[in-house]
């Protein structure tokens, strides 16, 4: 522990940030860092943007905060309409919050109140994937499948029914379709065993985030889960806290797969690191049913405040004005190619996967067997530290339920340009070369030479 009054996570002392601009940050010693993970996959527009600053200041000159039960605000109304339009009007109602965890909590409570209002109070269970991550608050943590985060609180959370999600890297099935069909059958069996009448909904990330290293679920699986929810009369909740607002090259990752959830949550990129804001989008009939039964018994103090919503409006306007969905697709293709070229150099790179500007690189101790490194070696932390020494920020986690496996995410701002992707790859290449050198045993200089007979 340091002498600082702050505590977050245990680890070495961190450099003090000085300033930032575009995809770059500088510490107080003058060292520069390319933001290869958008902070926590949230600074989608990069740093130091004058247009976002101007929009925030303009709103602050009017009013920064009003409480949602006392006033409506033009930015909240406008941002709500924008979000509805981004999902083609299929999710017609919006509820604002300040974070991803808050958005997930809101979705869980709306879904529960919906069935309560319908006279189905026996519906009390959710289904989610293992591994997964849905937030750090108690309700969201109950949906999360990541054992180190769950362990201290297992007896206190209302845990979901956990089912395995697709793993197109490690599965032993004959082919990917067979793998998906088996997992859908397992999900159906688990839902049937729990009792269809007890189910509220199925919550999932359309593309995995930090808990799986951008693991893809795929169209066949997502559409299969949509069909299961319809069969059992429960709701599909899409957690797009990380994948939403352009990160994958579409406004929302669900849109890649022609899947419409009943409720969708997003956060991170909506404020783009400039101001905390998240949102829940829901089917109009769900919200109308809840409101007719006495209202949504839920809320947060800063929900929908004018400053946060003005920031979100400016973010969406910038993405549209600068064609950043198209840039994300183009730079994502460039980044993928570079990551795959780097992977070919090292047998400890097991898998490269992702979409848009959300890419995961999974590390293995043995390329043939795909065996993970021993957990105690903390390889994910080592390669992240090396990348930081080379002036590149990446985002590490464990791939296998938080207990084993090593991966890192490469998720630069959506504004990144071609030459900056090249710089990112150059810095990553240096870090990977140093990591590889550390894995290679040094020759024993004291060993006695052998004589050929």
Image (cartoon, rainbow, N blue to C red):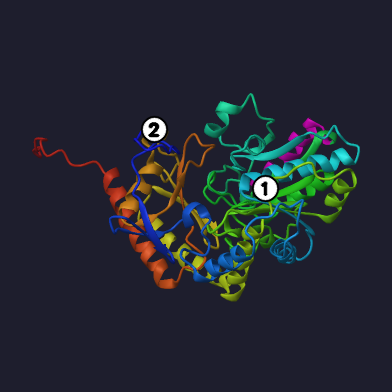
Q: Which residue is mark 2?
A: 376
Q: Assign the magenta stretch its main secondary structure.
A: helix
Q: Secondary structure at mark 1?
A: helix
Q: Quadrant of the N terminus?
A: top left
Residue 412's x, y, as percent?
47, 61
Q: Are marks 1 and 2 in contact (CB under 8 Å)?
A: no
Instruction: Tell whether position 336 is magenta.
Output: no
> Between 348 and 32, which is closer to the camera in this rendering?
32
Residue 166's x, y, as percent?
62, 46
**Looking at the rendered structure, which numbered label has been put on residue 6?**
none
Residue 283's x, y, as percent?
81, 54
> Between 289 and 6, which is closer to the camera in this rendering?
6
Residue 48's x, y, as percent?
46, 65
Q: Residue at x 82, y 33 (%)?
A: 198
> Between 377 and 4, which is closer to the camera in this rendering?
4
CA distance for labels 1 and 2: 34 Å
Q: Which residues are magenta?
A: 178-196
Quadrant assignment, res 279: bottom right
Q: Residue at x 62, y 62 (%)?
A: 312
Q: Is residue 186 visible?
A: no
Tell me if 441 is positioned left or right of 213 in this view. left
Tell me if 385 is positioned left or right of 292 in this view. left
Q: Is residue 447 above or below residue 428?
A: above
Q: Which residue is mark 1?
A: 103
Q: Is residue 148 above or below residue 13?
A: above
Q: Is residue 168 visible?
A: yes
């Amino acid at each position: 522990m340091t002498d600082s009054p702050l505590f977050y996570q245990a680890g070495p002392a961190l450099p003090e940030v000085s300033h930032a601009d575009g995809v770059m940050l500088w510490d107080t010693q003058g060292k520069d860092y390319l933001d290869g993970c958008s902070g926590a996959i949230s600074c989608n527009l990069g740093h130091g943007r004058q247009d976002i600053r101007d929009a925030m200041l303009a709103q602050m000159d009017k009013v920064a905060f009003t409480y949602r039960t006392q006033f409506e605000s033009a930015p909240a109304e406008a941002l709500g309409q924008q979000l509805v339009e981004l999902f083609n009007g299929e999710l017609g109602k919006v509820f604002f919050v300040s974070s991803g965890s808050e958005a997930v909590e809101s979705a869980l409570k709306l879904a529960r109140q919906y069935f309560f209002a319908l006279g189905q109070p026996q519906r009390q269970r959710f289904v989610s994937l293992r591994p997964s991550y849905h937030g750090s608050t108690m309700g969201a943590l109950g949906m999360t499948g990541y054992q180190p985060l769950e362990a201290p609180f297992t007896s206190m959370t209302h845990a979901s029914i956990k089912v395995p999600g697709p793993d197109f890297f490690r599965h032993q099935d004959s082919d990917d379709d067979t793998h998906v069909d088996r997992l859908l059958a397992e999900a159906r069996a688990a839902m049937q065993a729990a009792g269809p009448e007890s189910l509220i909904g199925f919550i999932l990330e359309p593309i995995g985030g930090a808990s799986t290293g951008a693991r893809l679920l795929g169209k066949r699986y997502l559409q299969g889960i949509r069909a299961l929810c319809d069969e059992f009369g429960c709701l599909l909740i899409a957690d797009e806290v990380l994948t939403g607002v352009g990160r994958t090259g579409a406004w929302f990752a669900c849109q890649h797969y022609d899947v419409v959830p009943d409720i969708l949550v997003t956060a991170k990129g909506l404020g783009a690191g400039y101001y905390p804001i998240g949102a829940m989008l829901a089917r109009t009939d769900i919200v109308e049913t809840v409101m007719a039964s006495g209202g949504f018994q839920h809320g947060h103090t800063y929900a929908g405040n004018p400053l946060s919503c003005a920031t979100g409006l400016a973010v969406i306007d910038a993405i549209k004005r600068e064609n950043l969905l198209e840039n994300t697709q183009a730079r994502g293709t460039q980044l993928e190619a570079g990551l795959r070229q780097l992977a070919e150099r090292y047998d400890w790179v097991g898998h490269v996967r992702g979409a848009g500007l959300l890419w995961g690189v999974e590390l293995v101790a043995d390329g043939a067997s795909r065996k993970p490194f021993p957990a105690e070696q903390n390889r994910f932390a080592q390669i992240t530290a090396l990348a930081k020494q080379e002036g590149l920020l990446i985002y590490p986690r464990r791939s296998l339920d938080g207990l084993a496996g090593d991966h890192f995410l490469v998720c630069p701002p959506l504004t990144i340009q071609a030459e900056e992707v090249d710089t990112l790859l150059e810095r990553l290449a240096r870090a990977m070369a140093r990591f590889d050198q550390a894995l290679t045993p040094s020759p024993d200089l004291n060993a006695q030479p052998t004589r050929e007979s």
